[in-house]
Image (tube, rainbow, N blue to C red):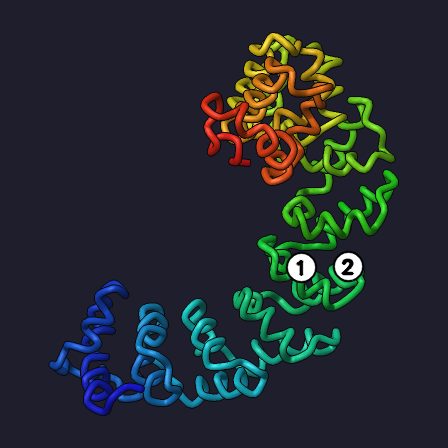
Amino acid sequence: MITQINKKLILLSLTSVELQKPPLCHSISLLFYSSSRLEKPKSKSKVSVAEYLITQHQFSPEAALKAASTIAFLKSPADSSSVISFLRESGFSKTHLEDVIKRVPRILTSNLDTVLKPKFKVFQDLGFSDSDIVDIVSSDPWILWRSVDNRLAPALLVLKNILGSNARVLKALKLPGWFLKYDLEKTMMSNVEVLQSYGIKSPQIIKYIFQFPRFFVHKPESIVDVVKRVDEMGFDMKSKRFLSAIRIMTSLTVDTWERKVKLFKSLGLSEDDISAVFRRVPQVFAVSENKIKEVTELLLSTGKFDISFVVNRPELLIYSVEHRLKPRLRVMEILEKKKLLGKTPNLITICKYSKQKFAELYVIPYANDLEGSVHGKEIMIS
């Protein structure tokens, strides 16, 4: 709680702070240590935003000054109070209010009846609870400036139509996809229809919306083009990896894709090999060029694997060289030389094990044999 003395100092210093508009980091110190009063604004109808928020609505000095850095004065504090009262009645806590107004101070000057209430009504009409609406607005206060008829209502209807429930829509609106900024009828709905036309089922599409939200706001024509390219590479459209392949290819520019292809060719892969790698593990093409080269060179340097091994097991290209491949290859090499293994396990299996599982199977039972040959820390890092 602010003491009466500090509160007085705050109010005495607000006008000075707002006129000079210092950076926020200095504003707090000025707030508590400034004791001089500068001239009041010439217009008596204007009210200091910071003073108003602190005295009338008990905002913290930090939140008040942050809001005041964008809007210094209010012409109609009564209207602003109506806005704040409406938000409070709608379920916004003090923390919610401070956060929203800090991020979007113009809410204080917005028209309650023509700007705010219609947006809340859209959510209410679709069956969202007060707490749902608070969560949605708090996640992205700028949605209050989306057009109800042209953007907000149509986007919400598309999301509910595709996702099937308010709970899923609420979850989607909290994702960093900024869905309500887009015309979802032209982007998401069209993209979902394209994917469905290729046999991809709704549950898989919904799963991908939550995992890769930005994929669904690409221009539909770009998705269609990518689907054709993936199809030309011999991909089975019924494969669960088909949608993953489309997403990966969509995320890459043509130049990036061509550089990856060129790199694979330099490592000894043919065009058919490259297509086979992509069909087996599309995610490999999202791995950096340096990583692909480093893993391939490591496997070939052992003398035990050739390029066909890499082509048939491209998932190895995803694993960390220093934290997984090198230490585990080293352990297996020592155990093989000492003839402690009846049968050499599959490298893919070895790399898939968690660090605990790998240690239980290949480190702890052979601790004496490995001591001095492999540093324990190397083995345990995953």
Q: Are marks 2 and 1 in contact (CB under 8 Å)?
A: yes
Could you tell me which residue is drawn at 72 percent across and 63 percent down?
Answer: 168
Residue 382 x/y as whole percent: 55, 36
In the picture of the structure, the residue carrying the numbered disc 1 is 172
Q: Quadrant of the N terminus?
A: bottom left
Could you tell me which residue is drawn at 79 percent across and 57 percent down?
Answer: 162
In the picture of the structure, the residue carrying the numbered disc 2 is 163
Residue 284 x/y as whole percent: 64, 28
For mark 1, give the secondary structure. Answer: helix
**Residue 131 in which image quadrant:** bottom right
- Kind of residue indicated by mark 1: Ala
Task: Name the one closer to the observer, 232 or 29.
Answer: 29
Which mark is first along the chain, 1 or 2? 2
Question: Of the numbered discs in the image, which one, if any, rests on residue 253?
Answer: none
Residue 343 x/y as whole percent: 73, 19
Residue 353 x/y as whole percent: 66, 35
- Left or right: residue 105 compared with residue 246: left
CA–CA distance between discs 2 and 1? Answer: 9 Å
- Kind of residue indicated by mark 2: Leu
Task: Name the one closer to the observer, 73 or 66.
Answer: 66
Could you tell me which residue is drawn at 73 percent across and 14 percent down?
Answer: 273
Could you tell me which residue is drawn at 67 percent across and 17 percent down?
Answer: 310
